Image (spheres, rainbow, N blue to C red):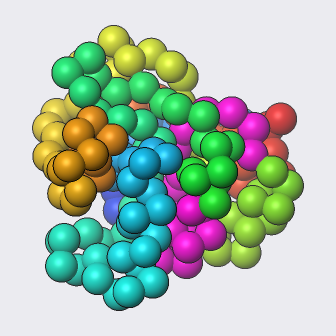
Amino acid sequence: MIRIQTPISSEVSGSLKVSDRVLLSGKIYCGRDAVLPKICQLIKEDRLKEYGIDLEGAVIFHTAVSIAGVGPTSSNKPEIEGSFELLSQAGVKMHLGKGAISQDTINMLKEYNSVFAIIPPVTALLGENTISQKCVAFPELGMEAFYEIEVKDYPAVIGAAQGECIY
């Protein structure tokens, strides 16, 4: 197991390989298909700082946040996978979700020294590893708003890195 603390450095993301098992700790952002296009728009408008969002070395977990907990959604939805490039350009080092992503996205991740990690759909177990959560943008989207959560030892497997993919 490779222990990773956020924010993730370029050296750490560059050292990860497909099938590496990791444990993530620190603050990560949560967003899925309803909010990620809005976050991308904030990037284009250079307005992330207005919300206190810093994506340098960040992890984006493709999930909603509800009283039931967090669990991954499919990362290959157009609104989610379509956000990978702009988020990676803005500094995101790990995209965390589930499902196969396209070869174009895999190649782009390599270009921006970012990776895609798969997290098992174990919502009940992740609750024990979630320390805190707060909504940081678009609260009107409810559980699909952009959240920041603090986690300890979130388990994941690197699914795409260095131009290679687990699928």
Q: Is residue 99 visible?
A: yes
Q: Is residue 11 visible?
A: no
Taking the image as shown, residue 105 lies to the left or right of residue 80, namely right
What residue is rendered at 47% in x and 77% in y? 90
Taking the image as shown, residue 15 lies to the left or right of residue 100, namely left
Residue 160 in the image, given as x and y percentages of width and height:
72, 49
Residue 158 in the image, given as x and y percentages of width and height:
64, 42
Residue 114 in the image, given as x and y percentages of width and height:
60, 64
Tell whether position 20 is magenta: no
Question: 98 or 35: nearer the eye?
Answer: 35
Question: 161 or 43: nearer the eye?
Answer: 43
Residue 112 in the image, given as x and y percentages of width and height:
64, 74
Taking the image as shown, residue 76 lies to the left or right of residue 163, namely left
Q: Quadrant of the C terminus?
A: top right
Q: What is the total number of numbered labels drawn onto the structure image?
A: 0
Q: Residue furthest front?
A: 140
Taking the image as shown, residue 120 lies to the left or right of residue 137, namely right
Q: Residue furthest bottom?
A: 46
Residue 6 is drawn in which quadrant? bottom left
Image: 161 above or below 56 = above
Residue 100 is drawn in which quadrant? top right
Task: State which region is magenta.
Answer: 83-101
What residue is rendered at 27% in x and 46% in y? 141
What residue is rendered at 75% in x and 59% in y? 105
Image: 112 above or below 13 = below
Question: 80 or 87: nearer the eye?
Answer: 80
What residue is rendered at 43% in x and 74% in y? 41
